[in-house]
Image: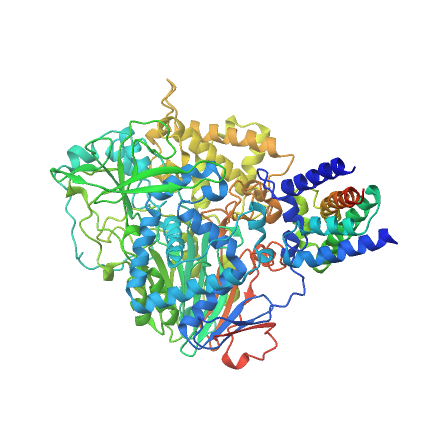
Amino acid sequence: MKFLTAIVLTALLSFISGLFLPWWGVAIVALAIAAMIHQKPGKAFLSGFLGVFLLWAGLAWWIDMKNNSVLSHKVAALLPLGGNSFAIIAVTGFIGGLVGGLAALSGSFLRASKTN
Amino acid sequence: MRIAPFAISAILTGGLVFALNKQWGAIPPMGKFLSPQQGFWQNAEPASKSFDAELKFPDLKGKAEVYFDERLVPHVFAEKDEDLYFIQGYLHAKFRLFQIDLQTKAAAGRASEIAGPKAINFDKEQRRLGMVYAAENAMKEIEKDEQSKALFTAYTNGINAYISSMKEADMPIEYKLLNIKPEKWSNLRTALLLKMMAKMLSSGTESDLAMTNAKAMFLPDELKKLYPQVPDSLVPIVPKGTAFDQPGIKPIPPATADSIYFSRKDIAMAREIDKPDPGNGSNNWVVAGSKTQSGVPILCNDPHLELSLPSIWYEMQLVTPTSNVYGVSLPGSPFVIIGFNDSIAWGVTNSQRDVKDYYEIKFKDKSKKEYWFNGAWTPTTQRVEEIKVKGGTTVFDTVSYTIFGPVMYDDSFQGAMNEGKGRNLAVRWTAHDPSNEGMAVYRLNRAKNYDEYVNAIKDFTCPGQNFVFASKSGDIAIWQQGRFPARWDRQGLYVMPGEDSSYMWQGFIPQPENPHAKNPERGFLQSANQRPADSTYPYFIPGSYITPRGITIENRLAAMSGITVNDMMALHGNYFNTLAEDARTVLLKYTKEGELNTNEKKYLELFRNWDLQASADSKGQTIYSLWRFALEDTIWGDDFAGLPNKEDWPETQTLFEYMLRDSAMKFADDIRTPAKETLYDMVTAAFKKAASQLSEREKTGLEWYRFNQPGVYHIMDKSKKDLLPFARAGLHVGGWGDIVNAIKGSHGPSWRMIVQMSSPTEAYGVYPGGQSGNPGSRFYDNYLDQWAEGKYNKLWFMRDGDRTDKNVKWVMKFKGE
C-alpha cells in the first residue's frame, strides 16, 4: 500500500511541481515523499523511479499521440535513437525515473538517519 | 547510522541533476530537454491545436483581429497602421522567433555567441564589412522621420510583446537544443536584418579581389574576352532598341588610370570568407492584357535564394481601413515585400549590379590611426569590435574607418587568406549609405497606380532590385531601382588606389535614368538577373549577371498568346536548358568521335538525343553538366592556376560564346604541355573524363536529381548534415541556376507567385516550407511537396465582409487596455 501511495503521490506532486519549478523539481518531490512515507531503500528507489517514470513517459506518450509523432520522430533521429518514437518516450521516462529514484533513495536514507 | 548512505545518494542525485542540467558539447542538457513539461515535448504541437486567443497589450491603440485560414496564413485587420505592424511583429515572433534572432545575430557578427570559436572569422568579416555600421546608419534614417519611427517601433514592440509573454516551455526547440535564450528586439535589429538582405544581394555581385588577381595574369584585351561586359546572346530587361537619354553625369577617368591602375600587376592577397552566392537571382515577368486569355495583366515572380526551413518568407495579409495588401513578408522586418493590393501587384528580382569597391589605404604606422589622403595624414575613426564567443574567450578587433569606408582587410585580417603582405583594403559599399528601404516598401504596399509605384520605389537604394509591376487599370512596367555609382569605363573592377580622391565615385546615376520600361508594344516584360540594358545604355554597369534564364523566358513569352494562369505555372516550372541548346552544337562539333570507345559513344548518343530538359530524371542534363565541368577544368585549369577558385573563372556562357566565335581560341592550348592542343583535343578529352565519371555512377543511376541533390535544410545547419531530421533532403526535382526553375542544390525559387489582375484578383503562391517555424508543427514543411510538384495554393484575398467565412479557422483578438 505504501509503495503504491508513494508512486502515485510522487507522480502527482511531480506534475504540480512541473507547473512552477524547473524540471529538477521532480527530485525534490521524490525526496520529500520518500522521507515522509518510509520504505526500505530498495522499495523507495523503485517507487521514486516509477513515480517519475510513469509521469514523464505518460505525458510524453500523450503529447506524442496528439502530435501524430511529428516531433518525436525528428528528435529521436537527432539524438540518435533511429527515429523511433517509443524509444524517445522510454528514454524520457527513464531519465526522469532515474532522477526520481535516486532522490527517493536519498529521502529514504534521510528518514532512516533521522529515526535511528 | 544511515548518514553515509544518505550523503552518497544525495551527492549522486545532485550530480545527476547537475549533469542533466548542463550542455555537453553539442548535447543539450538532457533532463531539461526531455522534461515533458518544459523540454522539447512542449514543442510537439497537437495536430488539433487551436490558435484562437484574446490578447491585451497596452501598446495597442485600437482593436484588431487576426483571422487564420486553414494554411495558418494570418489575415490581419487593424484600425491603425501602428497596430497592424505591432501585430505583424507579434506574429513573426510567435511563429519565427529563432530564425529572426539567429539571422540578426549573424548579421551583426555575433554568430560566435551561438556557434562558438569556429565562427570568429565569420564574425570579424561581418564587422569589418561594416554591417553594424550600415545598420546604424539605416536606423538613423528610420528614426529621423516621425511616421517611419512610429511604424518600425510598433513592429519592434510587437516582437517584444511576444517574447515577454512567452513561457520558457514555449521557447522554440532550437533554443532548447542550444541551451540559450532569445534576446529582445530593437529597431537596430530590424535594420540589421535588412542589411543582411543587402549583403546577400549586393555584396557578392562584385569580384574585385579575384579580378585584381586576374589582372595580374592577363592582358587588358584578354580580360575583355574572358570577362565580357555584354554577352553576345544577351536579352536585356529593357527591350533592345529602347532609346536612352543623354547621361546626366559623365564620369572622367583619372589621368593616372592607364599608368597606375589598369597596368598594375599585383595580387590582392585577401579573400572573402562568406561571399554571398552570386546566383542569388530570381525571375519575374508580367504580361499585358493583350496577351492573356482574360484580357487583364498577369504578374509572376520567383525569387531564388538559399532555401531553408523555416523559410525566409512568411505569408500574410495586412488590412487597415485605408490599405489592403497580401503577399510574403520577411520575418524580422515589417511590411509585405512581394505581393499585391486592391490595385496593383509587384515582384522583385536582384539587379546583380556591382555597388561595392575596394581602395588601397596607406597607413602612417601600425596603429592605423592616420592614413595618407590628398597629400596629408588624415585621422581614421576606430571601432573596437567585441566578439563574444560561446565556450571561449572574448575577441577584440579594431576596425579603422576611412573616407571610403571601413578598412576590411589589413595586417590583422585577410579574410580567407592566412598569409599575405597585408595590403590595407577599405570597402566602399552603397549599403553603408543612409537610406530607408522599408518605407519604400511601405509606400509600395499602398500604391494604387503606376505613378504611385514609381514614386514609392524611387528612394530604394540598396540592394538594387528589378521591380516588376502590373495594375488593375492595365499598365505593366519594370524599373531597375537602386542607387548605382556612375563609373568611368572599368572603374572599380579591380582594387583602386586610395591615396587621394581621384578614384572615388564621382556621383550616382540620376534615378530617372535607371533602366525601365512601361507598356511595350509587344505586351510583356521580364527580368532574370541579366544585364538590364544592351550596350547603348550610356553608363558602365558591371555586375554578376546571369544571361540564359532571361533568354528562355523571353522566347517563351514572345511565342505565347491567350496566356492563362496555368501557362504561367508551367513557365515557373520550365526546365528548358537554353545554354545547352547552343552548347550542344559546339560540343558535338569539336568531339573527335573516332577516338571514342563503345561506352563513350553510348553517352554521346544520349547527349545528342537529349530533349534539353534539365528535369529530375534527365540523363542528358547529367552528361551535359559533367562534360561542361570537365571542359572548364581542361580549358581554364592551366591558364587560371593562379586563381584556384573556380567561381572566379569565366562564366560558362562566356566559354561557349568564345568557342562559337573563335575556333582557334588561344586558351584551348594547355600551356603546361609542349604540344599545341586545339579545341578538338580539349573537348574530346573533357568528354572522356566525364564519360569515366558517368561509368562510375552508372550503378546508382544517372538521373539528374542524384547529382543536383536538391534539398531544403534547417536554417542553422550550414553543414547540411548536422540537423537532417529538421530538413527535407533528396527531393525529386530538376533544375539548375541557369534554368527558369532554378533549383540548384539547396538554392532556388523561395516563393512562386502568380497574380491575375482580374476582379476579384486571382492569385496563387507557394514556398518550400510552411507558416510555422516549429519542427514539431504540422505547418513546418507542409507546402514542400506541393512546391516540389509545381503546385500552388490559391491565395485568399480576404474582404472585410468575410470575417465569418468558413475559410476562417482561428481568430486572434487584440486589444489595448
Tell me the quarter of the image containing the N terminus of chain B.
Answer: top right
Looking at the image, which residue sits at the far bottom? B801
Q: Pick whichever, B548 or B512, lies toward us.
A: B512
Answer yes or no: is residue B239 visible: no
Residue shown at 72% from the left, 36% from the top: B8
Above or below for B665 versus B63: above
Answer yes or no: is residue B748 visible: yes
Residue shown at 21% from the left, 45% from the top: B403
Above or below for B66 versus B538: below
Residue B494 lies in quadrant: top left
Instruction: Locate residue B242, reporting x and y percent.
Output: 27, 60
Instruction: Locate residue B243, reporting x and y percent.
Output: 23, 60
Residue shown at 49% from the left, 61% from the top: B92
Task: Tell me: B522 left or right of A48.
Answer: left
Instruction: Locate residue B48, reporting x and y percent.
Output: 67, 65
Task: Tell me: A46 left or right of B208.
Answer: right
Residue shown at 40% from the left, 28% from the top: B637
Q: Pick whichever, A94 or B669, lies toward us.
A: A94
